[in-house]
Structures are given as structure tokens and as C-alpha cells.
Image (spheres, grey):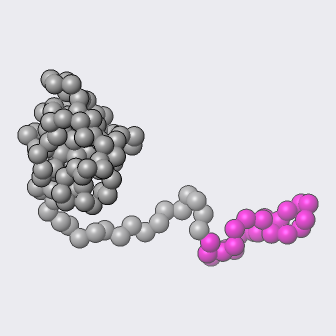
Amino acid sequence: MAQRKKKVSKKTGRPVGRPPGSRSVGRPRKVVEAPEQDIRGFNPLEVGNNVFVQTVTFAYLGKVKAVTKEALILEEVSWVSDTHRFSTFLAQGPQQESEIEKFPEGMDSRIERATIVNSVKWPHPLPTENI
């Protein structure tokens, strides 16, 4: 195999470019496949489920009314401005230190699915008043 001619800076006379074996930004990396897993049943965003949803800006509690390609529709919605201790919030429900504001009765919320960063099935009763 013929060797490539090394580029040399006209100003300094030194080689230009990356040293051999270094990674460039555009070079593809090897992808390691994870073992196939059955993830059915792991989707909390099913109609009828109570869920806690975190988006890029806010967090919500509510009951899934509908799921479309673009959006999640929640009913019985509450905005969660502060969970306090997150793991305790998930395990035991809202704490005295949590801050949760209930949406007005009958007002649903549309959450764009592209903004959702985390969602879990909520095993506790949904709030019925502000906390």
C-alpha cells in the first residue's frame, strides 16, 4: 500500500493534521449491542395509568387519558414544582415538604412527547388538592 504524503505547514514546516491512530470527529465508533430484552410492560404511558412525568422544564402527576404520536394527554393533572426528597416522593408519595398544585377540575394537559425525559407509573393516589 502506498504511503500518503504528509501535509506540511508552509509557515512552520511542521506536519499538519492528527497523529496516526488518533480519533477524528467524523470517524464512526464501534457500537456494542445490548442483549435483547423484553420491554413489554415497562411503558407507564398507557391509557388509564396514573403517572409521574418529568419534562425538560416541569413535572406532572396525572392519569393518562390519551397517547398520540406527538403528545400525551393527562387528566386529573397536578403540576409538581418540588418533590423534596425524590426517592421518598416516588416510594411514599408527596411529603409535607413537597409542593404540588392541582389543575382546575376538568382541565386536561397536553404534554409534547419530545419534551418527556422521564416517566414512571404512579402507585399512589393522585392529589385532590394543592400540597
Viewer-closest of 9 and 33: 33
Residue drawn 33% across the image and 53% down it: 84
Is 4 left or right of 89, judged from the image as shown?
right
**x, y (%) of residue 28?**
49, 62
Say if residue 37 shows up in the picture. yes
Q: Quadrant of residue 86?
A: bottom left
Figure label count: 0
Please determine whether, in this image, residue 13 is positioned above or below residue 52. below
Furthest residue toward left: 48
Residue drawn 85% across the image and 62% down it: 9
**x, y (%) of residue 123?**
12, 52
Judge whether residue 109 is colored magenta. Answer: no
The quarter of the rendered structure image containing the N terminus is: bottom right
Is 71 left or right of 23, judged from the image as shown?
left
Q: Main secondary structure of the magenta part?
A: loop
The quarter of the rendered structure image containing the C terminus is: top left
Please determine whether, in this image, residue 61 is positioned above or below residue 89. above
Residue drawn 21% across the image and 25% down it: 104
From which residue to which does the magenta span run? 1-22
Is 31 left or right of 2, judged from the image as shown?
left
